[in-house]
Image: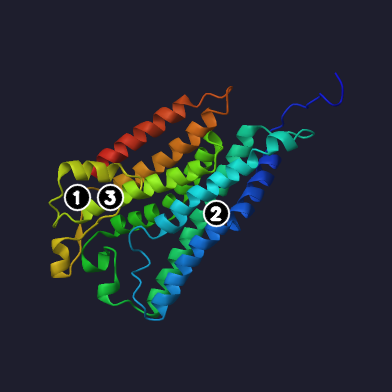
């Protein structure tokens, strides 16, 4: 065997994983799509602080759109870029599954960004309270939703949604090398969300039909504000179901994306138990969101 054909065995150490995770996180932080989404959120916060009606910081599908959908592009881009490591890491190779774990760890960047931007929005509203007509979310102060349900919606629509979008992008980038795959995935998810949730929001009061209710509860991102007749009275109406159950459902979906991607790259690692557990959690969360 010559030096030209020798390839050392792949290494998988905690130090290598930590280093790769930090590198991926830095790349995610400065990615143009991530910066664009962050900029749009900050622009909306600045306009709202200046008195321009832009909706409340905790309104539906704000973080999901700018950090979640955008994260699909960023995650896929980082995953495709990592493909070059299969060629470049000849002298000191690192297992592909280790690099994939590092990419998923970098998905914490949009999750932390979501927490910080939501904290900023809450702080700005404390300094300059919004008019009642500019608040686009159900809030406990109005008796429209309980405190636990409200905090649950913030957690799901913020860090969980941001992490999930980025993780889905990593999975797409690992499975499909063509850049257009991320575009198809992002647009498909966005269009389905808008069509289904638009139908759910137009149902008057809480009389949501079961087919719409079942489909809306199955979406990874949802909201609980029903418009329709509620607009005539100026009061918000909460959709049927349980935000707490849907949070468990969304977290389980994120876990399934990660585990399924790692299963395809870890021939010697049995992750079936994790898959079964997460599937059961997703099913239980979905039923809770639907029937709660």
Q: Distance between the residues labelled 2 and 1?
A: 33 Å
Q: Distance between the residues labelled 3 and 2?
A: 29 Å
Q: Quadrant of residue 89?
A: top right
**Where, quadrant-wise, is the N terminus in this rendering?**
top right
User: Residue at 69% of width from left, 34% of height from top?
Assistant: 86
Q: What element carries label 3?
A: helix
Graded by Cα atoms within 10 Å as few (under 14), some (14 to 19) or many (20 or more), the crowding at tag 2 reads many
Q: What element carries label 1?
A: loop
Residue on which disc 1 sits? 240
Q: Nearer the viewer, residue 27 or 248?
A: 27
Please identify, in this view, whether the residue under mark 3 or under mark 2 is nearer the observer.
3
Residue 195 numbered mark, or none: 3
**Where, quadrant-wise, is the C terminus in this rendering?**
top left
Q: How far apart are marks 1 and 3 (CA)?
A: 18 Å
Q: Does residue 292 show up?
A: no
**Above or below for 252 versus 147:** above
Residue on which disc 2 sits? 109
Left or right, residue 257 beside residue 89: left
């Amino acid at each position: 065997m010559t030096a030209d054909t020798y390839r050392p065995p792949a290494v998988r150490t905690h130090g290598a994983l930590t280093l790769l995770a930090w590198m991926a996180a830095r790349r995610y932080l400065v990615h143009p799509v991530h910066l664009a989404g962050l900029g749009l959120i900050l622009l909306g916060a600045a306009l709202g602080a200046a008195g321009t009606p832009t909706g409340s910081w905790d309104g539906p599908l704000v973080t999901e759109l700018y950090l979640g959908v955008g994260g699909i592009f960023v995650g896929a881009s980082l995953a495709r870029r990592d493909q070059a490591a299969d060629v470049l890491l000849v002298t000191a190779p690192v297992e592909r599954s280790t690099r994939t774990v590092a990419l998923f760890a970098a998905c914490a960047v949009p999750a932390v960004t979501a927490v910080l931007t939501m904290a900023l929005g809450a702080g700005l509203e404390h300094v300059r309270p919004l008019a009642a007509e500019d608040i686009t979310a159900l809030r406990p102060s109005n008796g429209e939703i309980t405190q636990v349900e409200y905090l649950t919606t913030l957690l799901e629509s913020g860090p969980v949604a941001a992490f999930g979008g980025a993780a889905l992008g990593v999975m797409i980038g690992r499975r499909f090398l063509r850049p257009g795959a991320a575009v198809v995935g992002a647009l498909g998810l966005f269009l389905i969300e808008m069509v289904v949730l638009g139908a759910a929001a137009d149902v008057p009061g809480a009389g949501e039909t079961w087919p719409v209710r079942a489909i809306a509860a199955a979406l990874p991102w949802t909201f609980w504000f029903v418009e329709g007749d509620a607009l005539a009275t100026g009061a918000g109406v909460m959709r049927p179901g349980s935000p707490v159950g849907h949070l468990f459902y969304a977290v389980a979906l994120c876990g399934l994306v990660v585990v399924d991607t790692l299963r395809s790259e870890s021939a010697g690692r049995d992750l079936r138990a994790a898959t079964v557990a997460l599937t059961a959690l997703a099913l239980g969360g979905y039923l809770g969101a639907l029937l709660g």
